[in-house]
Image (cartoon, rainbow, N blue to C red):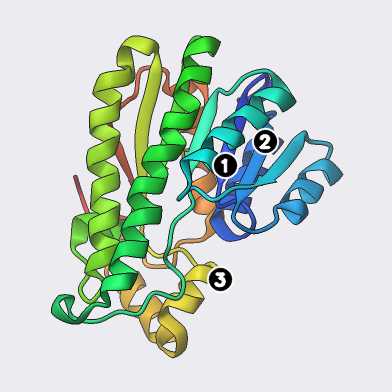
Amino acid sequence: MSQLDGKVAIVTGAARGLGRAYAEAMAREGAAIFACDINSCDDTVAAIVAEGGRAAGAITDIASMDSCTAMAQQAVDAYGRIDVLVNNAALYAGLQGARFENLDEAQWDAVMNINVKGLWQSCKAVVQPMRDAGGGSIINISSLAAVYGLPYGLDYVASKAAVIGMTRGMARELGQDRIRVNAVAPSAVMTEGTEDFFGEKLEKAKKVIAAGQLIQRNLETCDLTGTIIYLASDNSAFVTGQTHMVDGGSWFL
């Protein structure tokens, strides 16, 4: 029996990169996947189905509560329940770094709208279906940037620190409903988003990041999927409110 047999998982930001990797890995463990993104998830769904998995998808804008509500309802309509939410969607690629006093205000607002408010809205949308299912697991993607204090990206750092605080607060509120809430905080993962973020400085950044870790190589998507599967599965049934660092030993909590 696979670890996620019988479970229904929503993954936001699932069109590419980490979100797609999470969706495909969870499907291989038996989960029925509802893949969501502001862009089409057709490729993600097709890849899962081609491997014999179950998947459906929808265009979802987590900045809109109506869109999040529709996401949850479509997942219930497709599969009858919701057991897992992976809150992966976030603004990262394309952000313009600067000293905090010089950050663009419109960019700051956009980051908070997606990375903080959007996560809150996604959680609100799935909570009642999870209660109806007898419990569930919410997995919020934070970042090493939040606990390290990454310079020249305070908008992103603040948003991912908020994710950790929200995870702890929601865990306390939802424990009585048997809904677990945990965060995962990776270091920089080698995805399209990371390449966009660092641009021409990517190779230098990769060396600096690896040198600051106890395990001196760069984090790949496959290093994260095991943690996601663990938190989605019943193997973590007594784990909630925690931030799981997947960073090669960069930071100890």
Quadrant in the picture for residue 127: top left
Q: Which residue is mark 1?
A: 11
Asked whether the viewer can see residue 93, the reply is yes
Of residues 113 and 211, the one nearer the viewer is 113
Q: In what element is the residue under mark 2?
A: strand
Three-letter amino acid code at the position of disc 3: Glu
User: Label 2: how many residues lie within 10 Å, few (<14), some (14-19) or many (20+)?
Assistant: many
Q: What separation in Å lies between label 2 and label 1 (alpha carbons)? A: 7 Å
Q: Which residue is mark 3?
A: 192
Residue drawn at the location 63% of the way across and 37% of the way down:
26
Three-letter amino acid code at the position of disc 1: Val
Tell me the quarter of the image containing the C terminus: top left
Three-letter amino acid code at the position of disc 2: Ile
Q: What separation in Å lies between label 1 and label 3 (alpha carbons)? A: 18 Å
Of residues 8 and 217, the one nearer the viewer is 8
Q: Which residue is mark 2?
A: 33
Q: In what element is the residue under mark 3?
A: helix
Question: Is 82 placed above or below 99 here?
Answer: above
Disc 1 or disc 3, which is closer to the eye? 1
The total number of labels drawn is 3
Q: Position of residue 37 (x, y in %)?
A: 60, 52
Question: Is 99 placed above or below 135 here?
Answer: below
Residue drawn at the location 55% of the way across and 55% of the way down:
18
| Sequence order check, earlier mark of 2 and 3 | 2
Q: In what element is the residue under mark 1?
A: strand
